[in-house]
Image: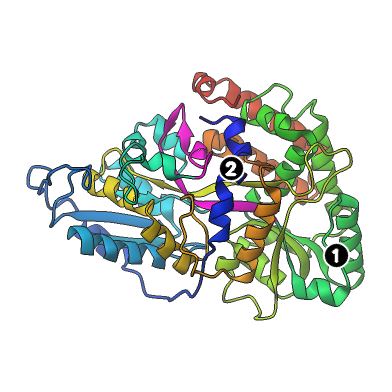
Amino acid sequence: MGSTSAHTNEGLGRRDLIKRSVALGLISVPTMSFLSACASSGGDSSEDKKPKGQTSKDNPFGVAKGGKIDVVIFKGGYGDEYAKVWEAAFNKKWGVTATHTGTQEITGKLQPRFNAGNPPDLVDNSGAQKIKIDVLHKNGQLLDLAEVLDAPSVDDPSKKVRDTLIPGTIDPGLQEGKVVALNYIYTVWGLWYSGKLFKEKGWTEPKTWDEFLAICKDATSQGIGGLAHQGKHPYYINVAIMDLIAKKGGLEAMKAIDNLDPKAFVGSDAAKAAVEAIYEVVEKGYLMPGTNGLTHTESQTRWNQYKAVFITSGSWLENEQLKQTPADFDMKFMPMPLLPGSTMPYEAIRAGSGEPFIIPAKAKNLAEAKEFMRMMLSKEWSTSFAKEANSLTILQDGVDPSVKLRPGTQSTVEVAKKAGTNTFRFLYTEWYSEMDTAIQNASNELMAKRIQPAEWLKRAQAAVDKAAKDPASKKNRRD
């Protein structure tokens, strides 16, 4: 697992999925408060008293009627309505009652529960406040999901669940060779812009970095920011920096970072060119004013108000900004433009799976949690997710063709189709959370002009070298 070949083949498995698309309409329902969720899941029934079901091909984990499941969902760009639909379907099929918590404060709400040995049964561990997967894994707090992935598929019991997924999409959930997180959503990352603004200004999609800078310059002369970024969350500007590195230096440059190479950053021509290109945007005054001090939603909302031309994000952006996006905005997604001498084509994109779901090792209702995850990977549940959250899942051919996508998400599908097998995906963000944070912090300093590109490269390399000293890092490897 984790090989580049898996990633470069993702496009093939995706073509049928792309034809089926997705969609629409989010309904806002007040979520149960965390306290009431905790109260109702507070361990009032021990394992001994729990009903046990007969295992069979249709019930591989032995779920029994009358059981419970405690589900915590990150309520961000995809909302949590889809999970309520799933929970109702789960109750209808198995007679299992769900306790539902929708929150953005994953670490704040759940770290005390993990520490006390009373975690939920299934968690969508995402967002800026997610619990670090590598830390949970090292502490033995995550279930190895091999049992779920090797179970019979709901739709075709002659196949294992893992054989129904888009190739390469389970790789980001790997820790030391074990899949401990299921990244459920097929995600692309890159640049976004307004089709309406482009049409009004007579701009065309920039395929080279020079063309990108020319649009930023033109916009700035008209009082519009060139590039907005989510300053308080430098994860987002790292999308641009890391995409430029991968596209300039190819898969080898990407693997050098994931494999903690002593020349991953310092000594890498691709890394030097990428960070200097981003710094040029800062130096020439092409950033949207104030963007360094804004949260992701604040920055994205100003972008929706035409205060900047471009913004970096993943394919959850449209859903996250539904209420702030003007009806005629015409949201569009595009690949990162090319630096001179780039190894990859313009069409290449960062793509793969996002939104990690985990099952805590000490979950009280393990059979229910495993079956819930198995059902997530059925066509019925994949389609209901698509309807509620306007996004594709990692299930091959997993969305009913009757479902329609919103404009921005439809454009991600079209870009992904053009990319074909030219996709790439960094894994250091999942494997080495401390290194990821250090690189984000360096990017924060860079965007504020407090450090220069050479210092950014030094800090990023120091973070790599520190991660490489951990003996566990030897078990994470991309070939």
* Residue depicted at 49% across the width and 75% down the height: 25
In the image, the segment drawn in magenta is: 166-190
Residue indicated by mark 2:
10
Quadrant of image for the C terminus: top right
Q: Which of the 4 image quadrants contains residue 307?
A: bottom right
Nearer to us in this view, 374 or 142? 374
Name the residue type under label 1.
Thr
Asked if residue 177 lies in the magenta stretch, the reply is yes
Question: Which secondary structure lies at badge 2?
Answer: helix
On the image, the x and y values in percent for residue 363 come to 26, 44
Would residue 149 be visible to someone looking at this image?
A: yes
On the image, the x and y values in percent for residue 167 come to 52, 40
- Vertical placement of 42 versus 442: above or below? below
Q: Residues within 10 Å of mark 1 (few under 14, many from 20)?
A: few
Between the residue at mark 2 and the residue at mark 1, the CA separation in whole angstroms equals 29 Å
* Residue depicted at 49% across the width and 63% down the height: 78
Q: Which mark is residue 454?
A: none
Dot 2 or dot 1: first in sequence order is: 2
On the image, the x and y values in percent for residue 410 come to 62, 65
Nearer to us in this view, 11 or 84? 11
Asked if residue 212 lies in the magenta stretch, the reply is no
- Vertical placement of 165 versus 103: above or below? above
On the image, the x and y values in percent for residue 276 come to 84, 42
The reply to whether callout 2 and callout 1 are in contact (CB within 8 Å) is no
Left or right: 246 in relation to 2: right
Residue indicated by mark 1:
204
Q: Residues within 10 Å of mark 2 (few under 14, many from 20)?
A: many
* Residue depicted at 91% across the width and 59% down the height: 214
Left or right: 39 in relation to 378: left
Name the residue type under label 2.
Glu
